[in-house]
Image (spheres, rainbow, N blue to C red):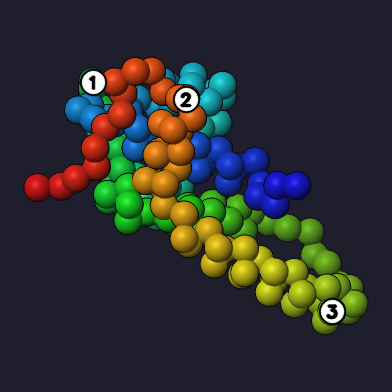
Amino acid sequence: MILLSRRSLLALAAVADVALHARPQPVAAKALAECLNLPPRHLETLLQTLVRANILKGVRGPRGGYELARERRRINAAEIVRAVMADTAAEPEEAQDNRFIDTIIGPIVERAAQAFLTELEAVTIDDICQSACANKLLPEGSSRSDFTI
């Protein structure tokens, strides 16, 4: 049972893909969309959400695209999920007026969600990249180190 929205899963995959492939040049949105089997327009809004959250950095120009805003070991899964959730929360929602949900169910689910996000804080993009390499999901020689000078 996966508790994350499809949008959150795509965001995690997109950031991991950028982490794995953005050196020496940024990853183009079109290439990223192709890798994730998505139309580029659908992915672009998600990428912009991640840029606003200082997870990705947009690079303009003919060889532009996206790269990590910070080292991959300094980006955790929870902050990616929170950025996507905050962006989704900005969308209008139908008004719910249910005392049982508001008083009993809501707080229980909120505590569970916080515990879930706390667990995700221990998972970094570096962990995800290492797992992809260990499971041989990348072509030979595509493993890249993560460092800043």
Horizontal side of residue 149 vs 101, given as left or right = left
* Front: mark 1 or 2: 2
Residue under label 1, please give it: 62
* Residue 126 can be seen, yes or no: yes
Disc 1 versus disc 3: distance between alpha carbons?
53 Å
**Residue in view at x 53 percent, y 26 percent:** 36
Q: Residues within 10 Å of mark 3 (few under 14, many from 20)?
A: few
Near-viewer residue (138 or 15): 138
Disc 3 versus disc 2: distance between alpha carbons? 43 Å
Q: Please report contact status of discs 1 and 2: CB closer than 8 Å, yes or no.
A: no
Up-down relation of residue 109 to residue 93 (above or below): below
Whole-percent x, y for residue 61 in the image: 22, 26
Q: How many numbered marks are there?
A: 3
| Of callouts 1 and 3, the N-terminal one | 1
Left/right placement of residue 113 relative to residue 119 reads right
Residue at image x 47%, y 54%?
123
Residue positioned 41% across, 52% down in the render: 124
Residue that badge 3 annotates: 104
- First in sequence: mark 3 vs mark 2: 3
The answer to whether marks 3 and 2 mark residues whose Cβ atoms lie closer than 8 Å is no
Q: Amino acid at mark 1?
A: Pro
The residue identified by callout 2 is: 137
- Mark 1: give few (<14), some (14-19) or many (20+) Cα within 10 Å: few
Local secondary structure at mark 3 = helix
Element carrying mark 1: loop
